[in-house]
Amino acid sequence: MDEAGDFFSGAVNTARDVLADLVTRAGLHLRPELLSRGTAQQCRVRLAFLMNYIRQLIFLMAAGMIDALPSVKPRAGAARAKLPSGVQDVTASFVAASDPRPWRFALAPAQYVPMPEMPDISGKPAPDEVPAGRFIEKVIALGGILADPAPHAKRMARALRRWRAAGEMAPVSLQAVPRFRAGRLAESFAQVLSVRLNDALAVAWNDTG
């Protein structure tokens, strides 16, 4: 395996270790219904780090694929059948009333929007226990991505190619800083990952193929 392959392998294994530590620490492998407020906060902090870290890892893989992937021809969408006169489409109301949709990991972070000034709101005491289902759902999704990140990197590579073709500026990566004791290995990979990603994006944006 070459140096780049060694780095990717180490970065993925490090993320898996952080994820496994989170599962064990919170007891998520036992499928609890509720977590204590303190445990839920630990989950949030670790998941926030992992999501930023995994996004950067996928971006870095994608940056090397931008000009190697074949172009995808858009497929014609199936035309929706026209409703008879007087019949109302109530699909949207059924979707709105259905159960919460499964959590999906966004490959690109949401666009930054300045926070508005917060009005004074009378604080309510936080609950002592928090539902664990959403945390378990995120852990399963992230574990699946780490098991096979290549398809996600290909999707991201096509998105990067579209952004570049549209004349957008190259994305800039900020280091994913853990707000917990993640260990020297995780902190080192997070730092190097950000540097490598910015270098790779700069090269990809200057290489028009």
Image (cartoon, rainbow, N blue to C red):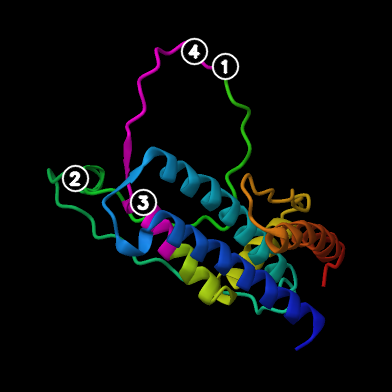
The label nearer to you, 2 versus 4, is 4
Q: What kind of element bears circle 4?
A: loop
- Tell me, yes or no, whether the two marked residues, 4 and 3, touch with CB atoms within 8 Å: no
Disc on res. 117: 1
Mark 4, residue position: 119
Q: What kind of element bears circle 1?
A: loop
The alpha-carbon separation of the residues under discs 2 and 1 comes to 37 Å
The picture places residue 201, in percent across and down from the top left corner, at 79, 61
Mark 3 or mark 4, which is nearer the start of the sequence? Answer: 4
Q: Is residue 26 magenta?
A: no
Q: Quadrant of residue 62?
A: bottom right
The picture places residue 168, in percent across and down from the top left corner, at 75, 50
Going by the numbered disc 2, the residue's amino acid type is Val
Mark 1 or mark 2, which is nearer the start of the sequence? Answer: 2
Towards the viewer: 167 or 46 = 46
Going by the numbered disc 3, the residue's amino acid type is Arg
Q: Is residue 81 left or right of residue 70?
A: left
Crowd tier of the residue under label 2, counting other residues whose Cα lies within 10 Å: few below 14, some 14–19, many 20 or above:
few
- Tell me, yes or no, whether the two marked residues, 4 and 1, touch with CB atoms within 8 Å: yes
Give above or below for 124 relative to 2: above
The alpha-carbon separation of the residues under discs 3 and 2 comes to 28 Å
Q: Which residues are magenta?
A: 118-140
Identify the residue at horizontal 61%, vertical 73% (top origin).
Answer: 13
Mark 3 or mark 1, which is nearer the start of the sequence? Answer: 1
Q: Is residue 131 left or right of residue 147?
A: left
Give above or below for 81 relative to 181: below
Q: Is residue 139 magenta?
A: yes
